[in-house]
Amino acid sequence: MSGTSMGRLWRDGLWDQNVVFVQLLAMCPTMAVTTSGTNGLGMGLATTAVLVVSNMMIASIRNFVSSQVRIPVFIVVIATLVTLVDMSLNAWLHGLHKVLGLFIALIVVNCAILGRAEAFASKNGVIASAVDGLAMGLGFTFALTLMGLVRELIGVGTLFSQASLLLGPAFSFMEVTVLPGYTGVLMMVLPPGGFLVLGLLLAARRLIERRLARPACAAGPAHSACSV
């Protein structure tokens, strides 16, 4: 696998084809668990683990599964991995498991995971599929964590609250009270706040894209980025 192809996978997963900010997939967990940066980080990392391993497993069996039954097989593989992740979180990160609750099990029906299995892992090798899963997973984690941090900061004035309780004592250094005595904005930790923050972040991404496109447009108006 060439360095150019590897870089393309990373760029797609983290920015160009970001699961949340570009494809607008997995909206259910995105809106539900991003009430804090800690929740978003935990959900993102759990999903990333499933993405990477499922992509690798599906890539390794792609030549042995007929096209007629590939979707049921993919779902069984993903469901098995989600069950293992759910049990692992319950055993070792019980606090986080209690907070995320049902949304861990709903990783099974996350369109991003089945979509990457069908669109990429079923057509490429194990290494490329692992990189694709990791890039997409980290892009998803970045989106959830960023949304959680924005909602948490405006909502209650903290960053990564209860990280030591949900992720373990080693993560206590992440807990920051940015605005002591802040009364908060309740709407930001309720569902309307999720839609508002998502809309603002989508607008910010579009502005960044337009700013990055200016040099290319100056060099040649026919450049595809000029249409952003």
Image: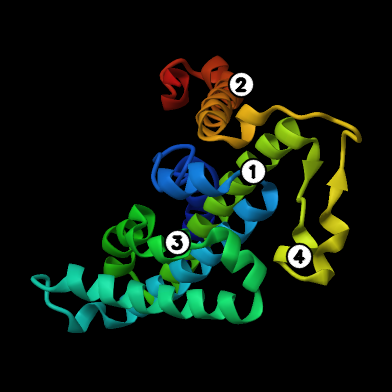
Which residue appears at 64% of the width and 48% of the height? 145
Q: Position of residue 171 (x, y in %)?
A: 81, 64
Which tag, 1 or 4, sits closer to the chain's start? 1
Which residue is under mark 2?
Answer: 211
Looking at the image, tell me whether mark 2 or mark 1 is earlier in sequence order. 1
Pointer 4 residue: 165
| Residue picked out by circle 1 | 148
Point out the tag, 3 or 4, that comes first from the N-terminus.
3
**Looking at the image, which is closer to me, 102 or 178?**
102
What element does badge 3 sit on? helix
Report x, y in % for residue 74.
26, 72
Do residues under tags 1 and 4 come within 8 Å of each other at their CB atoms?
A: no
Residue 217 versus residue 175 in the image, above or below: above
Cα distance in 3D space between marks 3 and 4? 19 Å
> Gap in Å between the C-alphas at discs 2 and 3?
40 Å
Kind of residue at disc 3:
Leu
Q: CA distance from mark 1 to mark 4?
A: 17 Å
Q: Earlier in the sequence, mark 4 or mark 2?
A: 4
- Left or right of 81 on screen, residue 69: left
- Mark 3, residue position: 102
Q: Quick check: can you spot residue 4?
A: no
Q: Label 3 vs label 1: CA separation?
A: 18 Å
Of tags 2 and 1, the one toward the viewer is: 1
